[in-house]
Amino acid sequence: MLRVRTYLAPSEIEGIGLFAAEPIPRGSLIWKFNPTFDMKVDLRDVPEDDVYVRETLMRYGYQPSEEPVYILCGDNARFMNHSPTPNADDVGDITIARVDIAAGEEITCNYAKFDHRFAESGFAVGWA
């Protein structure tokens, strides 16, 4: 769950992005997994013919290990875009500001640090 004020807006990186609504100092907690709010879904439990659910998980979720288990953020954190030079850093189940992030600046992360699928393929899976 996000721990800072944010908003969604068009991104120069990809589609919609997550932006800081106020300054976020370096080291601040931006996001933390909350099992009450964020979903952990095993793709093996989703029927093959439930295409929409599978596509949504693969587009907006991330796969933290080789297991086909996805985390789907329960808030707008799922719109955080990838950058090879991110301003946020993912450490386990939390995301922190790597640098001071200005109000109005897009919050970015390196998907390869926490998404097994991205680390293996070098790209995020979009809609089929």
Image (tube, grey):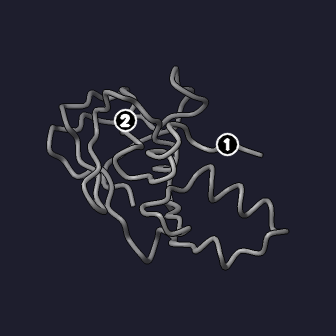
Residue under the image location 33 percent in, 55 percent down? 31
Question: Which amino acid, mark 1?
Answer: Gly
Q: Dot 2, how many residues are within 10 Å of its Cα: few (below 14), some (14-19), or many (20+)?
A: many
Image position, residue 106 (x, y; %): 40, 30
Q: Residue furthest top?
A: 12
47, 67: nearer the viewer:
67
Q: Quadrant of residue 27?
A: top left
Residue visible at 51% across and 51% down? 117
Residue that carries the numbered disc 2 in the rendered image = 107
Assign the N terminus to one quadrant of the image.
Answer: bottom left
Q: Residue type at mark 2: give it.
A: Ile
Name the front one of labels 1 and 2: 1
Name the residue carrying label 1.
Answer: 126
Q: Which mark is residue 110?
A: none
Question: Circle 1 — which element?
Answer: loop
Residue 16 falls in image quadrant? top right
The residues tagged by marks 1 and 2 sit, at their Cα atoms, a distance apart of 20 Å
Left/right of residue 10 with respect to residue 4 in the rendered view: right
Q: Is residue 23 above or below residue 59?
A: above
